[in-house]
């Protein structure tokens, strides 16, 4: 139904009027058939518009309960969609998450320079693989489905996922990461089909939209666990996530996960692309930090903006993940990092995927600071802001007032006040 479609999938000009006309037309038709009146959940920056759904629509594609209101919000620096229909970063409501899978409709949206989601007909879509290969090949979506598929659970996280002192909720501090089951063909399968030539060492991937999403990854990574994905959580990849085809580069910074994937070129060196602005640094230590995510975790309950009704037993819970592989251990401290206790892993543990942890927690009603820290299968341990400061040889309090360089995988503290309110305690 047109009125339900994300505004970002429409062209910038004339779309408002056209959709309004269509909305009025379908509304009248549905009313004549005795339709059920429901209210759409407002997207960020929009006001709720009444929406009419026919009974057959409600059967055809399910809606969530009208009592469930969890929504994505745009980052406060940039409204989305803006007056030109461009979408910038949009945050997943992690505070409401359960389990490890992000519903596709709540997956964060990351666009480097803002984009209008391209409206791609999968029948017309092609993936070209060329460059240093024996046989350059063009794959239709039907061609891709003739190769063996894999389904794997992986997180995607934007480099911009920085926790700042001004951020109030876990959606604001950590909402630029989400986790889906991705289905598609391993990139290695397709590259082998084309025959990678000797001397090739990098691949460049390109998306189909106006602001071309492109990025270079090492051939070794491309041959390892990257997926040309057409499926997300049991159905087609969502338009905002790259329909009909996206690259999933497990564990790497979000920007390498090229959406609306249309071209892969096999090359013998790193290619700078439009996206490299701000993502490459002459400082080698900083540059290294922008590639693969380190171990990370965050407590989603209790977290900023929530309120505990009073002392008593609660389930403290959160998410842990690492670009280095599977999460091996999550420790929790309820005294700001003085003493630590192992949390339980609750649910599936997948490499390079969100992993749910939890523990019974008895709150005595006194002010306290809760923190979590994860360790991955490589033995890497999530650092605190003070540890990061020591590593980079800056004053211990430096990262309370300055942004973290590169990717921010530092420990997130939440302060629970004696009145039960929870606040960001960076
Ligand atoms: N074609 C294209 N691919 C893209 C982008 C883009 O703007 N265009 N944004 C990248 C960035 S910066 C991130 S963080 C991830 C976000 O993926 P998501 O929107 O599915 O969450 O997609 C990456 N792939
Ligand atoms: Mo990103």
Image (cartoon, rainbow, N blue to C red):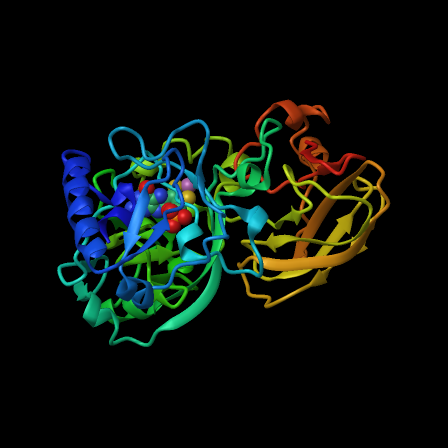
Where residue 271 appears, as percent x and y from the top left, is 31, 43
Where residue 142 appears, as percent x and y from the top left, is 20, 71
Question: What's the residue at 50%, 52% (across, down)?
Answer: 68
> In the image, 305: left or right of 273?
right
Task: Indicate the quadrant of ligand 1 in the picture.
Answer: top left
Q: Quadrant of the C terminus?
A: top right
Where residue 404 appears, as percent x and y from the top left, is 58, 32
Q: Quadrant of residue 375?
A: bottom right
**Between 280 and 170, which is closer to the camera in this rendering?**
170
On screen, residue 397 above or below 384: above
Question: What's the residue at 55%, 48% (across, down)?
Answer: 94
Q: Is residue 267 visible?
A: no
> In the image, 21: left or right of 77?
left
Question: What's the residue at 59%, 41% (across, down)?
Answer: 170
Where residue 140 appears, as percent x and y from the top left, is 17, 65
Q: Quadrant of residue 73?
A: top left
Q: Quadrant of residue 36?
A: bottom left
**Between 71 and 113, which is closer to the camera in this rendering?**
71
């Amino acid at each position: 139904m047109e009125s339900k479609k994300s505004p970002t999938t429409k062209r910038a000009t004339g779309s408002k009027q056209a959709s309004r006309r269509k909305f009025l037309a379908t509304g009248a038709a549905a009313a004549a058939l005795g339709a059920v009146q429901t209210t759409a959940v407002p997207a960020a920056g929009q006001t709720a518009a009444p929406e009419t759904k026919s009974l057959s629509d409600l059967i055809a594609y399910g809606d969530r309960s009208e009592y469930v209101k969890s929504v994505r919000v745009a980052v406060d620096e940039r409204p989305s969609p803006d007056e030109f229909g461009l979408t910038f970063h949009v945050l997943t409501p992690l505070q409401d998450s359960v389990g490890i899978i992000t519903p596709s409709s709540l997956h964060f949206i990351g666009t480097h320079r803002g984009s209008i989601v391209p409206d791609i007909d999968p029948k017309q879509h092609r993936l070209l693989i060329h460059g240093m290969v024996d046989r350059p090949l063009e794959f239709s979506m039907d061609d891709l489905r003739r190769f063996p598929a894999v389904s794997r659970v992986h997180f995607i996280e934007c480099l911009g996922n920085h926790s700042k002192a001004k951020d109030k909720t876990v959606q604001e501090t950590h909402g630029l990461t989400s986790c889906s089951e991705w289905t598609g063909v391993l990139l290695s399968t397709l590259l082998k089909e084309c025959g990678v030539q000797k001397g090739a060492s990098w691949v460049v991937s390109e998306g189909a939209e106006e602001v071309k999403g492109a990025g270079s990854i090492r051939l070794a990574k491309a041959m390892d666990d990257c997926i040309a994905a057409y499926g997300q959580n049991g159905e087609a990849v969502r338009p905002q996530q790259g329909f009909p085809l996206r690259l999933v580069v497990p564990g790497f910074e979000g920007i390498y996960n090229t959406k609306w994937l249309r071209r892969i070129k096999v090359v013998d060196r790193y290619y700078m692309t439009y996206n490299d602005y701000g993502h490459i640094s002459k400082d080698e230590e900083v540059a290294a930090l922008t590639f693969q995510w380190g171990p990370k975790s965050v407590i989603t309950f209790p977290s900023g903006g929530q309120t505990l009704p009073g002392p008593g037993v609660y389930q403290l819970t959160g998410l842990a993940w690492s670009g280095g592989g599977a999460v091996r251990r999550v420790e929790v401290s309820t005294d700001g990092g003085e003493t630590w206790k192992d949390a339980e892993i609750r649910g599936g543990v997948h490499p390079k995927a969100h992993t749910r942890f939890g523990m019974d927690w008895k709150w005595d009603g006194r002010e306290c600071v809760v923190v979590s820290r994860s360790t991955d299968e490589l033995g890497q341990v999530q650092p605190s802001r003070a540890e990061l400061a020591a590593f980079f040889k800056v004053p211990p309090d430096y990262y309370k007032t300055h942004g973290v360089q590169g990717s921010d995988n530092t420990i997130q503290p939440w302060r629970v006040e004696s009145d039960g309110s929870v606040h960001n305690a960076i």
